[in-house]
Image (tube, helix red, strand yellow):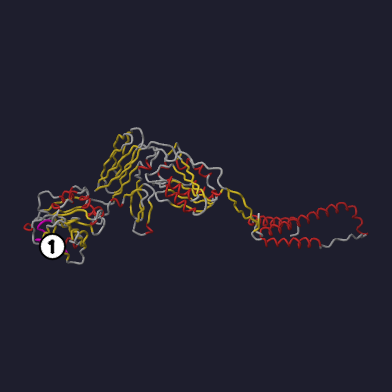
Amino acid sequence: MYFGNIQGLYLLLFLIALIILYLIKAKPKDITIPSLLFFSADKKVKKYNAMLKKLLIRALFFLQLLFIALLALAAANPIIKIPIDAYSLNTVVIVDVSASMQTLDGRISRMDSGKQELLKLIKGKTSIVLAENNPVIMVRNVSSSRAKALISNLDAKDISTRLDSSIMLANDLLGGERGTVVVYSDFILGMNDDILAAKKIAEANDKRVVFLPTGERQENLGFSVLNINRGKGEVFVKNFGKRGKAVDVRLISGTNKQESRIQIEPYSVEKVSFDIKRGDTILELTQKDRLTVDDKIYVVNPYERESNILFITNHKGDDPLLDALEANPQFNIQIARPPVIPDLNHDVVVIGKVDKVQLLPNTFRDIKKYKDKGGKVIIASHEGIESLDFQDLIGFKFGSLNKKKAEICVDIVNDFTAEISNPRCFTSVLRYNSVEAIRNSTVVVASTKWGKPIFIMENNLFYYGILDSYSGFQEQINYPLFWSDLINYMLGRESLANFNFKTGDISLFGGNRTDRVVLDKAGIFDINGRRVAVNLLNDAESDIFRDSSIMNKTEFKGDYEKVKLEVNLDQYLLLLAIILFLYELYYIKRRGDL
């Protein structure tokens, strides 16, 4: 032991003053008074009481003496050194809160089955890291008792996990200090989760890494994939076990309920297709198993009806554009052949291959009035389009037909060009119509490599400048998706993918940083006025039949280096002095001096 403030011992000088005060007290002198001699019979009693009084006075003296000594020692800041395990002073607990930790082993989940053993390993200042796909620091440098209380109440989420990045985060939290990193998990890892490499890096930085596995292998059935395409949905049900199973799939969409049975062989998948109606759609496996979070699929469709599209054309042969629109169940197509044009009350008007001779004089003037009132117009290029009089409908003019091969490249990436923008030049044409903008309101979305406009957006009008018969774009898988995305974009309808997410996604509803939402639970939610569906859809979490990557708990060694922990005793001595002072007041009160 040593003293951090040796000058504090000068307070012991007050002990000398206290002793002098007791020594200089006047001593009583015995005087014989004849009139009081009759009290001599009580002399023995008086002597006995006087002796008790002296003892009481001496007890008070020793209390005061001890009080001053404690104050002096506390002021001197005494410090003792206690040998202790160097790695037990700081602990970082990594808790796997992924979906697979919800698996029931008997009646208790994997999350809870090993908690008692985990709590025994928590010592010293403690930080807690939640091992999600992006690890989260729950608390840092709290007491071990506080950390144990928090961990006792932790529940698993509906997300995936990443343990290697969690270990690296724990290493950073400890910094240059020694400490223990405890990893509590079922160790059902993704393909790129290299926890052994992360463990070696942490140990190279003088950290002790302990793996504490939990859970047993369980068979499981679950939804693994969801595809949403043009109003249609398809899901894949996967058998993660070694036995074939028959399972009932229930579809709930509004008041409509359907149920079908499928047979799934071991380690195989089966596809289930369904229509995505407006509102909420839920698919569920009726046979419950050890992991329930992957037994349901949630889908949200906020749009009330199909889009009504008027397709104006005189062409009666094959038309890739018309075929793509008619194949989309989201669109209700009405074909108009000039000169007969119905009332323009549709959501979108598409002008295809029209014959100039068949057009009435005011056809394009009526379409312009429709556009100016908010209607959406698409003009598809074709040979001879330069001869049409668009009557101020468009903000660009046509030149001659260019017969030179050219690559078409995306200039602006948005909701309807995103799928065709990688690579940026997505197709080539053998012929195209030269176009020149004459209004500032026109925006070139795609062009040839030497800058000739191909896609033009102008207010409520879109010009599609690819001649499909001279291009391979119509044969690409993205061709029908492009038209679906374009029309939805013009109508202000977002892709259904913007309403249906996977757990772990981070979404900015509203576009502000304050609207940042981490989707860690499966289900249907209203977030910032937006209804969304969230699903697990993660094979790594659903495959609870896999062997754990870590089979046994990491054992503690008994020969870890000891360090001397300095313990400051001043607070304890001061507390003891306060208690002694309060007792002294109580003692004097009982004696009757107060």
Answer whether residue 515 is visible to the viewer in this image.
yes
Q: Is residue 353 left or right of residue 59?
A: left
The residue sitting at the left extreme is 357
Q: Is residue 468 left or right of residue 4?
A: left
Q: Is residue 121 left or right of residue 357?
A: right
Residue 145 placed where, x, y %? Answer: 54, 49
Amino acid tagged 1: Phe
Residue 191 placed where, x, y %? Answer: 37, 44
Crowd rating for badge 1 (residues with CA inside 10 Å; few <14, some 14–19, many 20+): some
Residue 349 placed where, x, y %? Answer: 17, 56
Secondary structure under the numbered disc 1 in the rendered image: strand
Q: Which residue is mark 1?
A: 398
Q: Quadrant of residue 268?
A: top left
- Residue 83 sits inside the magenta stretch: no
Magenta residues, start to end: 382-399
Instruction: Tell which of 157 and 167 is nearer to you.
Output: 167
Q: Quadrant of residue 429?
A: bottom left
Which residue sits at x=21%, y=52%? 483
